[in-house]
Image (spheres, helix red, strand yellow):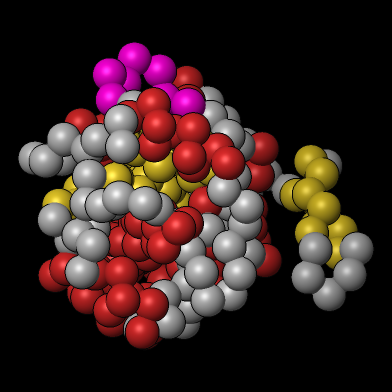
Amino acid sequence: MTHKEHISFVRSLAPPTQSSWLELSSLSSISGWAGVDEVGRGALFGPVVAAAVILPDRALPELIAAKIKESKQLSAQRRTQLAQQISALAIDWKIGFASTAEIDSMNILQATLLAMKRAILKLKVQPALCLIDGNQLLQDLHIPQQTIVKGDSLSLCIASASIIAKVWRDDLLLRMASKYPMYDLESNKGYGTQRHLKALNEYGPSRLHRKSFRPCQVHQGEKLVLTYSDGNALIITQD
């Protein structure tokens, strides 16, 4: 199957059933396919991280037997176990990220695409096809690529990339938590929980907070009014 045929084939696929993944419908080897996904796009603190993962054909039954799912549906312990299994099975996998400064400079969408591109370009094995989670193609990537909306629930390669990226970023945030204990990073992994937002109000943002994100645009001691619309949601307005 040629690269163009690969792309046409992926476009024609219907969403898989619970027991079926995109790769299982392929008429040829998927060993040259790289799944690419990101984590941390909505966080207030730290980098946005992407992973690119190339799996061999033999990995598919093992990962299906392990009940692989998109990273958000897995416990932290199960993600770590699967990340170890995926990294051991993979032909190649790499991490790419974009820093807080890059996020603030170019916006989160462009930083996310940059992180994905960096992960792909780090691969020692060049993919025949990149399956990109989402609906945005990567610019100036001279490798065939195909976007798949909600790809981490449709493709084993993308789901694997999602898990690898999530575990890598969570480990990074845990290491950062000891340096910035006031923000409760160990629990929130940089996302805007109530405790995190209150800490921003009290201490102001750190150098690793995303200053282009509105909740981070507050200085130490500056009052914020936190209006609770329900038990979970927060509306933040500057007083």
The answer to whether any part of residue 231 appears in the image is yes
Front residue of 172 and 83: 83
Residue lying furthest left: 124
What is the span of residues highlighted in magenta in the rendered image?
137-143
- Is residue 142 covered in magenta? yes
**Image quadrant of residue 199?**
bottom right
Q: Which quadrant does the N terminus fall into?
A: top left
Q: Is residue 88 above or below residue 127?
A: below
* Residue 232 on image: x %, y %: 78, 70
Q: Is residue 145 left or right of residue 135?
A: left
Q: Is residue 184 visible?
A: no
Using the image, determine if residue 10 lies above or below residue 101: below
Query: Is 213 on the left or on the right of 160, as rendered?
Result: right
For the residue pair 170 and 3, the one nearer the viewer reads as 3
* In the depicted structure, whether residue 214 falls above or below residue 166: above
Q: Is residue 120 left or right of residue 192?
A: left
**Image coords of residue 100 (percent x, y):** 40, 36
As for residue 212 lying within the magenta part, the answer is no
Residue 188: x and y, percent? 51, 67
Q: Residue at x 89, y 70 (%)?
A: 230
Q: Residue at x 16, y 35 (%)?
A: 126
Q: Residue at x 39, y 36 (%)?
A: 6
In the rendered view, tell whether residue 87 sits above or below residue 74.
above
Question: What main secondary structure does the magenta stretch of the protein show?
Answer: loop
